Amino acid sequence: MRLFLITNLLLPFLFAGCSESIQQPLKKDGELVILTRVGVTTYSVDKNKEASGFDHDLVQMFAQEKGLKARFIIAKSDADVLRRLMNGEAHFAAAWQIPTEEPDIRSSVPYFESRNILVTHEASLPITDIKQLANKNVYVIEGSRQETALQEVMKTVPDLKITAMHSDSELDLMEGVEKLRHESALVNNAVFSIGNNFFPELQDSLEIGPAKPIVWLFAHGVDPELISEANSFLERTQKNGEMARLRDRYFGHVDRLTQDDILHFMERLNSTLPLYRGLFHTAQIRTGIDWRLLAALAYQESQWDPLATSPTGVRGIMMLTGDTADSLKVSNRLDPEQSIRAGAQYLRDLRDALPDSIGEPDRTWMALAAYNVGMGHLNAARFLAKTLSSDPDSWYSMKKVLPLLAKPQFYSRLKSGKGRGGEAVIMAENTRVYNDILNRYERPYNAFPPMRRKHESAQGINKRTNPDRFEVEPAYRQIFSIPPASR
């Protein structure tokens, strides 16, 4: 009983302390606390524990500009974001949120627009009117604003059934519809655009509710100056192109492929990729480039056909030119092992040859373009970008400049002459989509050399040996220049 009384007495002070911390003006090198959610538009962490996402990157840009350190708190749902924000657990929320009617929560200026899309399988009859939702079961993420939107629909369609799922990802809902486990799902339009590349048999049947602005939400008591600075930042990034570049990084390539393109890729992912997966793994070990990116490039080049030949004379699964093959000591371009090894090495060489001023992921996308059009033409396009007051280190800018290599008024001024820059852009952007799909369906390959206990047989571990003695496989030792273990 005494513990209960002490706890209840302390709780108001604990929340007051939290609230006071966010009410204080942020100082230089201070900590900016942000609520977000895991999702394809917001925040995710890769195998190297590096965070990324549209909302994450946008907040980081703001924090760096203000000399602040950003600390992210992960909420479970939209409802959890609001609850924790009202408790004063963060300065603001950047989690693909829409304005709220809560009087104590303030919104930033909008920086995106979101719509709720009803997703169904193409084998089912399309739903074109809200009244058709009667007796339909629609899946949503528990605590999401899509669940709230459907609850509003129930006022006019009382027979609508809502199933709220415990999940971090709306892509899981889309997968359920694709596999016919769910009758339908309600997701936001940005997620649908991305997910449609993973699940091409889905269709956007109906838009439910009006479009809503996406904003940052600020906790009660936050310094008004912080809100003003955030609004100025969002408005400025809209005008100077930084917002457009960030949108392009996460969403600029998602609508490039047709349904037939994706279905064909998915079929070959199951039937053909297994034949070459091991070769791509080995190429990753040699070059450090994720095998799934190499496989995506190979599919874009040849659709994983080791005998492919183009009218211009490039050949093999990685479509190497004769000169490139000779320089990389390839005796037979139609041999998939040689082709994949050389193609991966060539891509790494191109990426390494780019100036240090080009960061990732732009560096990789430009290397892909150079794989198609050649480094000479890419450098010419970068020079042309400077003359046009465009950023030669930005893929977003170079996507617009590269096609100019095919126009006489531009290539006539360049030593490299005419180039197929538009084709290079298409190739790089398509490869990005195939890479996204592979990242969802194929596991990363752990290229770190496996460790074996001393005297371990090929059949298994000899349990009588000392478990603290390990030795690197000889093949890996040679690749990584690792000296033999001391005896």
Image (cartoon, helix red, strand yellow):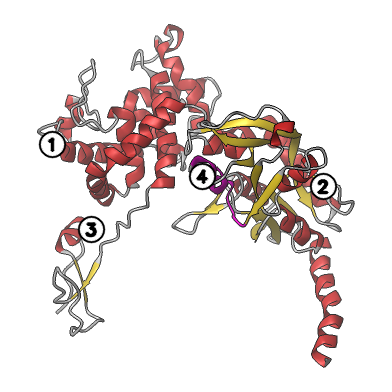
As displayed, is residue 203 above or below residue 453? above
Residue type, mark 1 in image: Lys
Provide the secondary structure element on which disc 2 rests: loop
Find the magenta span and give its range. Answer: 166-178
Residue type, mark 4 in image: Glu
Residue type, mark 2 in image: Thr
Of labels 1 and 2, earlier in sequence is: 2
Q: Nearer the viewer, residue 458 or 376?
A: 458
Of labels 3 and 1, earlier in sequence is: 1
* Location of mark 3 (residue): 480
- Cα distance between the residues tagged 3 and 1: 21 Å
Provide the secondary structure element on which disc 1 rests: loop
Q: Residue at x 79, y 69 (%)?
A: 18
Instruction: Give the class, few, some or many, for how many residues have Cα within 10 Å of label 1's Cα (few <14, many ≥20).
Output: few
Report the side of 3 relative to 304 (left or right): right
Tag of residue 100: 2
Q: Residue at x 16, y 59 (%)?
A: 475
As displayed, is residue 470 above or below residue 366? below
Tag of residue 175: 4
- Cα distance between the residues tagged 3 and 4: 40 Å
Foreground disc of the pair 3, 4: 4
Let me know if residue 96 appears in the view: no
Provide the secondary structure element on which disc 4 rests: helix
Instruction: Give the class, few, some or many, for how many residues have Cα within 10 Å of label 3's Cα (few <14, many ≥20).
Output: few
- Cα distance between the residues tagged 2 and 3: 55 Å
Query: In this view, which residue lies farthest toward the left?
Result: 331
Provide the secondary structure element on which disc 3 rests: helix
- Cα distance between the residues tagged 2 and 4: 30 Å
Of labels 1 and 4, earlier in sequence is: 4
Residue 444 at what x, y percent from top left?
37, 52
Report the side of 464 relative to 204 (left or right): left
